[in-house]
Image (cartoon, helix red, strand yellow):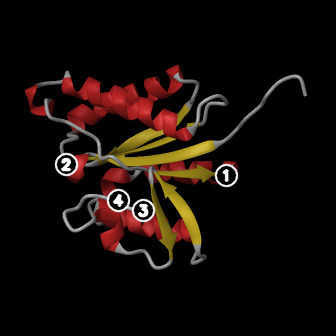
């Protein structure tokens, strides 16, 4: 084949440092389009960006030439610098170190878009931590498998809260 083709859909989730709810509706209205542009500029077409006060969801097509970890680094670094320009209240802004990243089949793409679009209503009922635990349980399907979470690895089941959040709400991993 004379050319390289790729269609890998990715759902990326990451939170603010210590899950502090600093992403106000006003900043999200600028942040989400900004994140979409960062993705686009790195050959990762954005399908949907959304989130809540303490985390973001990015659904995009993965670049044929960039690994997921590099895309995450670019998106988090760029957006962190951008947010810090939005006022003194964001001077100490940081994203949490870890992240969750999941492949999505084309047949599930519309459901992921709807899920991201409904984040505000969803989080009136469920915290980010509970959402992420539920999400991990769902993708594990009750089958013992390893799921990459940035530099962390979680082997499930069972999913241990202390593994994910640590005693002081910091992610910890299995060395």
Residue at numbered disc 4: 122
Q: Residue at x 29, y 47 (%)?
A: 96
Residue at numbered disc 2: 21
Q: Residue at x 67, y 52 (%)?
A: 105
Q: Position of residue 99 (x, y in %)?
A: 41, 50
First-in-chain label (2 vs 4) = 2
The kind of secondary structure element at disc 2 is: loop
First-in-chain label (2 vs 3) = 2
Q: Is residue 85 left or right of residue 39?
A: left
Distance from Cα at disc 2 to Cα at disc 4: 15 Å
Q: Position of residue 52 (x, y in %)?
A: 30, 48
How many neighbours does mark 1 have within 10 angstroms: few (below 14), some (14-19), or many (20 or more)? few
First-in-chain label (2 vs 1) = 2
Depth order, front residue of 41/125: 41
Residue 89 vertical placement versus 164 (above, below)? above
Depth order, front residue of 169/11: 169
Q: Is residue 162 left or right of residue 89?
A: right
Quarter placement of the N terminus: top right
Distance from Cα at disc 2 to Cα at disc 1: 31 Å
The kind of secondary structure element at disc 3 is: loop
Quarter placement of the C terminus: bottom left
First-in-chain label (4 vs 1) = 1
Residue at numbered disc 1: 105
Q: Position of residue 130 (x, y in %)?
A: 33, 67
Depth order, front residue of 15/152: 152
Q: Quadrant of residue 111?
A: bottom right
The mark found on residue 175 in the picture is 3
The kind of secondary structure element at disc 4 is: helix
Q: Quadrant of residue 80?
A: top left
Q: Residue at x 58, y 36 (%)?
A: 67
Residue 125 vertical placement versus 118 (above, below)? below
Depth order, front residue of 156/57: 156
């Amino acid at each position: 084949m004379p050319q390289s083709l790729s269609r890998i859909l990715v759902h990326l989730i990451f939170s603010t440092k210590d899950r502090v709810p600093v992403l106000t509706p006003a900043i999200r209205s600028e942040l989400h389009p900004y994140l979409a542009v960062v993705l686009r500029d790195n050959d990762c077409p954005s399908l949907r960006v959304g989130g809540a006060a303490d985390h973001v969801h990015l659904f995009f097509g993965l670049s044929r030439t960039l690994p997921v970890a590099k895309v995450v680094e670019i998106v988090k670094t760029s957006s962190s610098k951008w947010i810090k320009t939005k006022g003194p209240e964001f001077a100490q802004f940081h994203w949490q170190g870890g992240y969750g990243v999941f492949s999505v089949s084309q047949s599930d793409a519309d459901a992921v878009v709807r899920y991201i679009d409904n984040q505000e209503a969803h989080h009136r009922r469920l915290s980010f931590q509970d959402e992420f635990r539920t999400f991990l349980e769902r993708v594990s399907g009750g089958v013992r498998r390893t799921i990459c979470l940035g530099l962390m690895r979680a082997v499930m089941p069972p999913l241990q809260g202390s593994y994910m959040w640590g005693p002081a709400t910091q992610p910890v991993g299995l060395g």
